[in-house]
């Protein structure tokens, strides 16, 4: 009986040591074994399961684009819009057309076009398809006559020849 008691005592001591050892170590997560009926998947992991059950974080709301700041520049006002003509010499007739933010100049067989910006009594010609640079003038309309002052600035000589200090007669609204 003494041998059996010692054997039991030894088993109890070994069991106590094992329990004490388990209590001192961190538990490791158990990885479930794949079932024989389901094929093995490389994505089946505790991390994948965790991310699938996590609540998605909402993305920030898109912000609206800033509204462009309006400028004082506009296209041709009604009194300036239309087609105008002047005769420089008997064989040199020029037609100037101003519509919205565009201008065209026809001088014999030559034709040029570009952009205009009108602010008050100042008109700026730019974006010409014949030359680079801007030309700025003051303008006035009296009756059917449009008159440009001398250039405040002009980068295109040909345009300056037909606008600076020139009066035009309206030929079409």
Image (cartoon, rainbow, N blue to C red):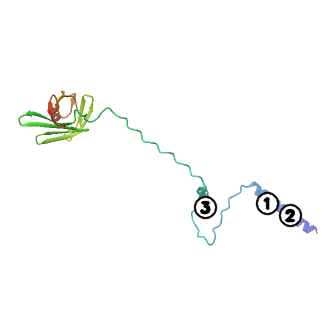
From the top left corner, tell me how far across and down residue 36 is, in percent.
63, 72
The quarter of the rendered structure image containing the N terminus is bottom right
Q: Residue at x 24, y 34 (%)?
A: 78
Looking at the image, residue 133 sits to the left or right of residue 20; the answer is: left
State how far apart marks 3 and 2 are (Cα).
Answer: 41 Å
> Is the C terminus in the top left, top right, bottom left or bottom right quadrant?
top left
Give the Cα distance between marks 1 and 3. 30 Å
- Which residue is at a point 59% across and 56% down the rendered structure image? 51
How many C-alpha atoms fall within 10 Å of the one at disc 1: few (<14), some, or many (≥20)? few
Nearest the eye: 4 or 105: 105
Foreground pick, 128 / 142: 142
- Work out whether 115 lies above or below 29: above
- Badge 2 density bin: few <14, some 14–19, many ≥20, Cα 10 Å: few
The residue depicted at 82 percent of the width and 62 percent of the height is 15
| Labels 1 and 2: the sequence-earlier one | 2
Upstream in the sequence, badge 3 or badge 2? 2
Image location of residue 121, percent across then percent down: 25, 28
- Element under disc 2: helix
Name the secondary structure under disc 3.
loop
Tell me the quarter of the picture where residue 127 sits: top left
Determine the residue positioned at 10% across, 34% down. Answer: 87
Q: Which residue is mark 3?
A: 45
Q: CA distance from mark 1 to mark 2?
A: 12 Å
| Closer to the camera in the image, 104 or 42 | 104
Q: Is residue 86 above or below residue 9?
A: above
Q: Which residue is mark 1?
A: 18
Q: Nearer the viewer, mark 1 or mark 2?
A: 1
The residue pinned by badge 2 equals 10
* Residue found at the very far left of the displayed protein: 90
Image marks 3 and 2: residues in contact by CB distance under 8 Å: no
* Percent position of residue 47, x then y: 60, 57
Query: Of marks 1 and 3, which one's residue comes earlier in the chain?
Result: 1
């Amino acid at each position: 009986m003494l041998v059996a008691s010692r054997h039991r005592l030894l088993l109890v001591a070994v069991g106590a040591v094992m329990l004490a050892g388990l209590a001192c170590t961190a538990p490791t997560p158990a990885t479930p074994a794949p079932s024989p009926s389901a094929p093995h998947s490389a994505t089946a992991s505790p991390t994948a399961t965790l991310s699938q059950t996590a609540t998605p974080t909402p993305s920030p709301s898109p912000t609206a684009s800033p509204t462009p700041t309006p400028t004082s520049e506009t296209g041709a006002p009604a009194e300036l819009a239309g087609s105008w003509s002047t005769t420089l010499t008997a064989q040199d007739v020029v037609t100037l057309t101003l519509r919205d933010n565009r201008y065209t100049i026809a001088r014999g067989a030559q034709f040029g076009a570009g952009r205009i910006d009108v602010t008050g009594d100042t008109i700026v010609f730019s974006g010409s398809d014949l030359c680079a640079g801007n030309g700025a003038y003051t303008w006035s309309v009296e009756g059917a006559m449009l008159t440009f002052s001398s250039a405040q600035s002009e980068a295109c000589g040909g345009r300056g020849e037909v606008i600076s200090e020139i009066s035009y007669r309206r030929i079409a609204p």
